[in-house]
Image (cartoon, helix red, strand yellow):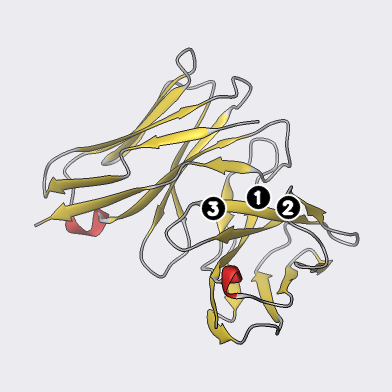
């Protein structure tokens, strides 16, 4: 399976600021996704990162709050904008997930907003 | 849409005993059911998955069973070891939604006591 890395691994941010999280994969992948895991909770899909076009967002998530870039088949970024304490979560990059494909997750970025 | 229920939320066993975690799903069209293990401070790690054309799959001490008629699937861990202690998530793929939209259960915190 592909190796997934995320930067930063963790951060503490002030409310009102923005943080950009990077996801790097060691091989080209078609499908990349961003998930959120709130403290003690399960995983929720934020959006599908589409290469060369705008991301596809799930209900409850909007581009202004979570802009996503995917300039190529090995890299994607998620920005958490105008943060509030409610944004404190683990943000996870994921790949695979096509028809019949196994889906893998990165190590996550642990975000605390004060 | 798809809904996944997972039980129990916490499970404590003695080392060497077996552990069973059960999940039910609502969308009869779902056909992919992975299980993830998440250790503290890490991203979810795929441990086993099953597709709807298979009733049971085994990998060493881990097995998963699927009953499509009843719409439930279970994770079985035999001869548990302290390193099995983690949070386990089941998931089902919602075919009608985004390709990456695995719908997750709420997780089971497994504690294996030496």
Host chain of mark 3: A
Picture residue at 20% right of the left edge, 39% below the top = B78
Above or below for B12 versus A90: above
CA gap, disc 3 and disc 2? 17 Å
| Residue at mark 2 | A31
> Could you say whether the residue bearing mark 2 is in a helix, strand or loop?
loop
CA gap, disc 2 and disc 1? 5 Å
CA gap, disc 1 and disc 3? 16 Å
Point out which mark residue A72 bears: none
Q: For residue A5, what is the image quadrant?
A: bottom right
| Residue at mark 1 | A96
Same subunit: marks 3 and 2: yes
Host chain of mark 2: A
Same subunit: marks 2 and 1: yes
| Residue at mark 3 | A43
Picture residue at 45% right of the left edge, 15% below the top = B70
Mark 1 is surrounded, within 10 Å at the Cα level, by few (under 14), some (14 to 19) or many (20 or more) other residues, namely many
Among the two numbered marks 2 and 1 on one chain, the one whose residue lies closer to the N terminus: 2
In the picture, measured across the screen, residue B62 lies left or right of residue A90, that is left
The reply to whether callout 2 and callout 1 are in contact (CB within 8 Å) is yes
């Amino acid at each position: 399976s592909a190796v997934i890395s995320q930067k930063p691994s963790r951060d503490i941010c002030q409310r009102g600021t923005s943080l950009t999280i990077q996801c790097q994969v060691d091989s080209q992948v078609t499908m990349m996704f961003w998930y959120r895991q709130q403290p003690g909770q399960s995983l929720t899909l934020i959006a599908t990162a589409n290469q060369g076009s705008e991301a596809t967002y799930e209900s409850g998530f909007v581009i202004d709050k979570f802009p996503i870039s995917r300039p190529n088949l090995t890299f994607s970024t998620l920005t958490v904008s105008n943060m509030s304490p409610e944004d404190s979560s683990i943000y996870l990059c994921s790949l695979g997930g096509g028809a019949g494909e196994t889906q893998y997750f990165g190590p996550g970025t642990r975000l605390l907003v004060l | 849409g798809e809904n996944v229920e997972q039980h129990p939320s916490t499970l404590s066993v003695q080392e060497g005993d077996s552990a069973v975690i059960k999940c039910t799903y609502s969308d009869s069209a779902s056909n992919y059911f992975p299980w993830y293990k998440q250790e503290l401070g890490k991203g979810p790690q795929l441990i086993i998955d099953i597709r709807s054309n298979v009733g049971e799959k085994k990998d060493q001490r881990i097995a998963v069973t699927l009953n499509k008629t009843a719409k439930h699937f279970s994770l079985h861990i035999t001869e548990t070891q302290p390193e099995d202690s983690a949070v386990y998530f089941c998931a089902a793929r919602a075919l009608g939604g985004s390709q990456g939209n695995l719908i997750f259960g709420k997780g089971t915190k497994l504690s294996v006591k030496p």
